[in-house]
Amino acid sequence: MSVMRPLIAALLLLAAACGAHAQLSIEITGAGAQRIPVAIAPLAGEGALLDGGNAAISAIVRADLERSGLFRAVDVPRLIPQPTESSTVNYAEWRSRLADALVLGSVSGRPDGRFEVRFRLYDVVKQAALGGVAYTLTREQVRATAHRIADYVYEKLTGEKGVFSTRIAYVVKRGERFELQIADADGANEQAMLVSNEPIISPVWSPDGRRIAYVSFQNKKPIVYVQDVQVPKQRIVANFKGSNSAPAWSPDGARLAVALTRDGSSQLYLIDPDGGNLRRLTNSFAIDTEPFFSPDGRWIYFTSDRGGSPQIYRMPSTGGEAQRVTFEGGYNVSPRVSPDGRSLAYVTRNGGRFQVALLDLGTRQSLVLTDSDLDESPSFAPNGRQILLATILNGRGVLTAVSSDGRVKQRLTLSAGDVREPSWGPLIP
Amino acid sequence: MKRICTILLAAALAGCATTETATQPPAAVEDRAGTTKPGAGPGASGVPEKPVTGVDLTGGKPAGADPLKDPSSPLSMRSIYYDFDKYDIKDEYKPVIEAHARYLRENGGVKMLIQGNTDERGSREYNIALGQRRAESVKKMLLLLGAREEQVEAVSLGEEKPKETGHGEEAWTRNRRSDMLYAGEY
């Protein structure tokens, strides 16, 4: 029958795009109790990079670090002469400004037209240099370079990887139109991967950050696609009878777990990203959906109503017996294991509100992280520090980020349209 | 209406300066927005290219003769409503499904699409599965009452196509729903 008639697709392929039309803006609504006071001095000569609408590198580094909720930027007065990474540091002076850490650096032009940025990070309390890096860049790489500097500072001072150079994916609904967008983690450089008049849900980055699997209704039913971030071409992964949904990448990127209704109720299957090697994983008469691999690849966590209400279970990723993971409450869905494998973020119904909670897989203690009502789709930052999620605020779809201890909250909003279905991309080496 | 595709295309044609770095190439764009047939489905409402509904003076059946559109016929009722996280068919809807099963039995060439829907709460993916369950439960009852497998297809729209876009119980009640649609209606 022609119910699912595929639309004759005259694809309009765009090879390049300017993405500055409606950037996400980020607002911090809470902060950690003990933030590291850090002084980011303007880099000597950084004004040379300001052309073309660029913000100053030091300003981007400062904004990145403050946005993490772990740092507080110390006011830096106008200094003459401007200190650079090779200046002698007057530690007493920086200590008097109450800075625990200090970044000094400079920008210089190169004969080939590119620029060189050098910076050094200092521990003001211990009066010691912690290291520094030099980067060569073009004017177009100002933001990316600033994020790298922020990542360096973050890692040196916290011992964890920074995520300022990572990207996020999300879906925007504007009127009747759906857009799968990717952007830098700070919301800049938004670029559309797919635009459709039908819903798009469940984008998820491949472990190498090169591809995104998602579900599109463009043919009037849910079908799983994979698309290369750089190539404007959709590839069908799963298009069987019924619904095809909930893609999850295996940690090695070689397989996808999906939920299909081809054999009756929603069940879990493994499939290759090119659509080959379909293998059924679960055999229940219940709803099984939302697979998510543990970081070591051994387990698949998933949502099932086999016990009478939707709860989270896990099973070996090779198939086999499932164990129930959540027991409190009558509605626990959307399992996402943290990058270190120690905790599980999920959505729980909490007295009529749908909120993101974190379960410590060792102690079995759980903690509700949000105070919103309609949370969906949690996604861990690749360093595990924050969880990005979608919620409804004042009737509009917005993304929020909450730190894994629930203390720091950020709100990412678009000037127009509903934002939903966030997915945080991997660390790019 | 935002014409992002036009803007993007214009930008691409103009060869505008991209702001990516060597490590972060630009996302390539695939535009499916123009590929939906106007009026081809529920998502097409609001699409500016809506076809003109013409007047047909050449004769044919008067509109009142179609039992599917006769408000006094149970066949004009197309929606089954559910409680939160439930997919069982309440007794009040059984006569409606019986009437449609009879119609399908008596009109072997007629085909039906059942779209299962949920309210916006909880997980989008769980709601896809729940919507499928709702649609399948209607299909199962139609088949038990004599409709044929080839006549009925069940699909899920999850929470993606709400009839009511509000965020309260009133909207949620109307969105927990299966719709029975005949060819030409979706």
Image (cartoon, coloured by chain):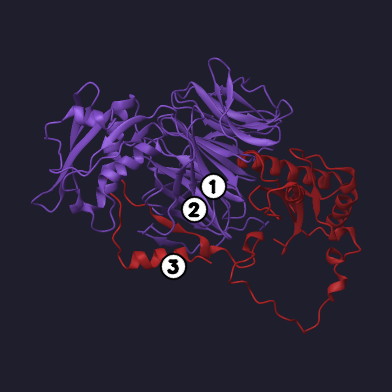
Chain colours: A purple, B red
Rate crowding at label 1 as few (under 14), some (14 to 19) or many (20 or more) other CA atoms within 10 Å: many
> What residue appears at the point 61 percent right and 24 percent down from the top-left corner?
A313
Q: CA gap, disc 3 to disc 1?
A: 25 Å
Q: Which residue is mark 3?
A: B6
Name the foreground residue: B36 vs B26. B26
Task: State how many labels appear.
Answer: 3
Write down the chain letter for disc 1. A
* Amino acid on which the number 3 mark rests in the picture: Thr
Tags 1 and 2 in contact by the CB under 8 Å rule? yes
Identify the residue at horizontal 64%, vertical 36% (top origin): A354
Say left or right for A232 vs B104: left
Of the residues tagged 3 and 1, which is closer to the observer?
Answer: 1
* Residue A12 position by quadrant: bottom left
Check the residue under mark 2 and report the chain it is in: A
Query: x, y percentage for residue A384?
Result: 44, 29
Disc 2 designates what residue? A414
Label 2: few (<14), some (14–19) or many (≥20) C-alpha neighbours in 10 Å: some
